[in-house]
Image: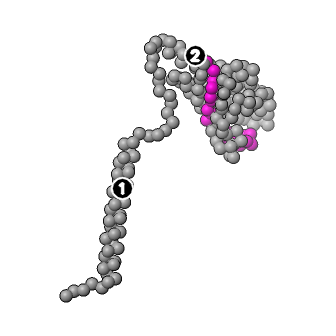
Amino acid sequence: MTRFAPHNNKKQMNMKHIQQFTTGTLALAFVFNLVSCQAPQQQEQAPKTPKVDNLEEYKEGLNENKALVTEFIEAMRVSNVDKLKTMITDDFSWWIIGKPEYLATGGEHDTEYFLGFFKGDELFPEGADFNTTSMISEGNVVAAEAEFKAKTAMGSNYENYYHFLFIIEDGKVKRMKEYMDTYHAKVTFGL
């Protein structure tokens, strides 16, 4: 009669459990990946295009929103705070990409901060070129790309590229999200 030593039997049982665990884990991972590939992605999505009863009226609204944004960017370029005040809602908000601990201007801002930012021309005493290069509109959302070029008060050149996302409500800007090269802004202005 062949007899296995007790420690060999335990080793065999442990190996069997390890194999079962490994097989089960791989099967679970496979199922999870299969399900997650089929699950819809939960990301922030742009508002759906509204049902359009009158196509011409809808197009006109899109053009009005784009004209508003063009005028808004021009008012920012020339620091026309009085004009900007008339173009924003009472609950206007401004978000700039970047963490506030890295970039002083990064994060959420209210109307007071926004208008204060555009008062005066201390940063760019010679003015600035701030040109919209492309724009698209859907529903109450306008996306715009722009180039900014100016000489700073310190004498250095500032050239940055921007992407803005505007939310329009009742013919005014309700929210502006701003994306740009944060490193260049930080280095140029010490923000």
| Amino acid type for the residue under numbered disc 2 | Glu
**In-image side of 12 versus 189 (left or right):** left
Q: Residue 115 location in percent, x, y?
A: 74, 28
Quadrant where the C terminus is found in the figure: top right
Residue 35 drawn above or below residue 19: above
What residue sits right under mark 2 in the picture?
Answer: 64
| Amino acid type for the residue under numbered disc 1 | Leu
Q: Residue at x 32, y 62 (%)?
A: 23
**In-image side of 72 versus 151 (left or right):** left
What residue sits right under mark 1 in the picture?
Answer: 28
Residue 108 - label: none
Q: Nearer the viewer, mark 1 or mark 2?
A: 1
The region drawn magenta spans: 171-191
Dot 2 alpha-carbon crowd within 10 angstroms: few under 14, some 14 to 19, many 20 or more: some
Outermost residue, bottom direction? Answer: 1
Q: Residue 172 location in percent, x, y?
A: 63, 21
Q: Residue at x 74, y 39 (%)?
A: 189
| Residue placed most toward the observer, 185 or 107 | 107
| Residue placed most toward the observer, 23 or 157 | 23
Q: For residue 22, what is the image quadrant?
A: bottom left
